[in-house]
Amino acid sequence: MALKKETRDKLLTVSTPTVATALYKRGFRIQAIQDVHPLSPDQPTLVGEAFTLRYMPAREDLNKLEVFRNHGHPQRKAVEDCPPGSVLVMDSRKDARAASAGAILVTRLMKRGCAGVITDGGFRDSAEIAALNFPAYHHRPSAPTNLTLHHAIDINVPIGCGDAPVFPGDVILGDKDGVIVIPAHIADEIATEAVEMTAYEDFVTERVQAGQGIFGLYPATDEKNLTAFAEWRKTNKR
């Protein structure tokens, strides 16, 4: 199921905490990718479908520099095959001792029109990547080549990234708070609900800033607050 433009546009207006709550209501508890951080605090919000790459522990006789001469090498092939608008999500076994990729490969993803890149390991050339204004998330900078510890083995298969399950085609949302994975089959309804939740949260923020207490307001357990919210929406065209 391809990500609809309408759904993408909605997700660009909401936050990962709001989406996490919408997922939790449906019993999804572990959809946040743990211990990954944006390379730049100013990078754009990330929304796109997951295209995955899985690493396994490297075996020295199979992971020499010569492997990059092979055009079918999974790391290089993933960079060239990740569809425009999609996010390359890498399972690096939560091991940032060696880089998952560097600035050249990330620049190639950007130039090919991909939406972003995520690893639960590390990127080399992290300052260069941060300057690209391209959504990128990792655990921490890492100088050594991936070949020293990671063997790229599978493309576009189900993976674990930062303890979150990621299936090809799942919808990825990344912002300053982190990255959340939305199962593809509920992406439309999650996006719609998150937009509604965001409107109420904005209303609540205004009321709290004006001095109102949170009981009955957040969550909305007092009918008077729902009536006031309905009026607020009309006035603010939300």
Image (spheres, grey):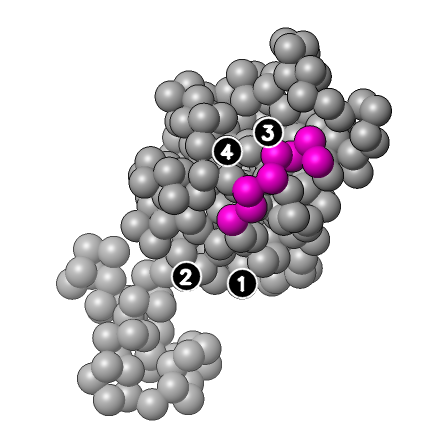
Tag 3 residue: 51
Q: Nearer the viewer, residue 30 or 176?
A: 176
- Whole-percent x and y of residue 68? 64, 16
Marks 2 and 1 close (CB-CB < 8 Å): yes
- CA gap, disc 3 to disc 4? 18 Å
Write down the residue under mark 1.
21
Q: Is residue 24 above or below residue 100?
A: below
Instruction: Answer whether residue 197 is magenta in the image.
Output: no
Q: Nearer the viewer, residue 107 or 195?
A: 107
Q: Residue at the location (72% across, 46% down)?
A: 93
What's the residue type where badge 3 is placed? Answer: Phe
Three-letter residue code for mark 2: Met
Magenta stretch in the rendered image? 141-148
In this rendering, which labeled residue sits more in front, label 1 or label 3? 3
Residue 90 horizontal/vertical position (percent): 62, 37
User: Disc 4 on helix, strand or loop?
Assistant: loop
Badge 2, how many Cα within 10 Å: few under 14, some, many 20+? some
